[in-house]
Image (cartoon, rainbow, N blue to C red):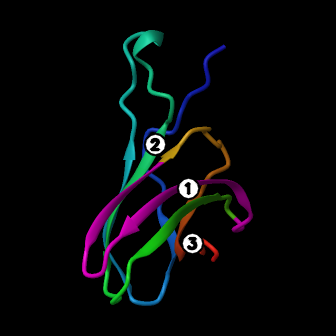
Amino acid sequence: MLTQVRDTEIPCNAVEIAEDIELQGHLFLLSLLPCCAQLALPYWAKILGRVFNQRTDEVLLTVKVTLVDGVGSPLAAYTDNVALESGEKGEFEVKLADYQTESAAYRLAIEETDLGS
């Protein structure tokens, strides 16, 4: 039995960004429906975006997308990492691998990753 996958995007209901990092935009993109199983992508949607490092030093960022249900409870989380030099722009691509039928929205968080000493 085939499951009908959502055919419209879900909204972003929260964005958290690390200090001195600028989010210059992001998009929610659905994967195209395959014409056969061999052409199916390993994800049902992805979030693409661009960030700018306003700091004077390099930074490693973790971009986290959390799918939430209608009451805001987390269903699944997916991440991507971006390394940026001072004053550099970069792009992220977070692939949403598992379709969650209860998904009502997503949250986007961009945090600095501590590499330790």
Residue 72, percent from left and from top: 69, 68
In the image, residue 88 sits, relative to residue 37, either above or below, namely: below
| Amino acid type, residue under disc 2 in the picture | Ala
| Amino acid type, residue under disc 1 in the picture | Thr
Residue under label 2: 45
Of the two numbered discs 1 and 3 in the rendering, the one whose residue sits closer to the viewer:
3
The quarter of the image holding the N terminus is: top right
Residue 97, percent from left and from top: 57, 39
Q: Residue at x 47, y 62 (%)?
A: 11
Disc on the earlier residue, 1 or 3: 1
| Amino acid type, residue under disc 3 in the picture | Thr
Disc on the earlier residue, 1 or 2: 2
* Residue 38 quadrant: top left
Residue under label 1: 79
Residue under label 3: 113
Question: What's drawn in magenta, residue-wise?
Answer: 71-94
